[in-house]
Image: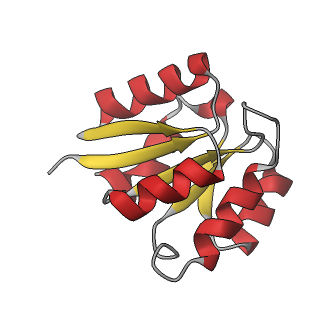
Amino acid sequence: MTKKVLDVGNCGPDYSSIKSFIERTFDAKVLQADGPEDTLEILRRDQIDLVLVNRKLDRDYTDGLEVIKQIKADDALASVPTMLITNYEEHQQLAKSEGAVQGFGKLSLQKPETKDLLQPYLG
């Protein structure tokens, strides 16, 4: 069964790279959201298997950690696996302290470790 991934806050080129990598590596479809409002709306409407949140949202450069906090604060959505996309380990740790799972950085998108990281959610 095809999995659904929600990509939040990435610019067009980064979204395209992530979408291409995930859709050719896994049986998954990648949807896009721009900020917390449409993210929560999509999560309430669709069965999403994994949420990827950019560290800084492209639309207004707000902190993606705030999106993670909103997802995890909603009892109906808190169980959806959520990853922060950042190359900075200290931000990964902050996201994990808010209930996210270990994420990855855009610089490691093509590395085998990223596939291994996504496998439990999309494999």
Looking at the image, residue 71 lies above or below residue 105: below
Q: Nearer the viewer, residue 17 or 47?
A: 47
Place of residue 102 in the rendered image (x, y in percent of width and height, measured from the top left): 61, 59
* Near-viewer residue (38 or 72): 38
From the viewer's side, name the closer residue of 25 and 5: 5
Q: Which of the 4 image quarters holds residue 108?
A: top right
Does residue 15 appear to the left or right of 64 in the view shown?
left
Please report the residue visible at 60 percent of the width from the left and 23 percent of the height from the top.
14
Residue 55 position in % (x across, y down): 75, 44
Residue at 52% in and 76% down: 78
Whether residue 105 sits left or right of residue 121 in the image: it is right
Residue 95's image quarter?
bottom right
Task: Relative to 97, say whether 106 is above or below.
Answer: above
Q: Can you say whether 18 is above or below 78 in the image?
A: above
From what the image shows, is residue 115 above or below residue 110?
A: below
Indicate left or right for 20 with 106 as reference. left
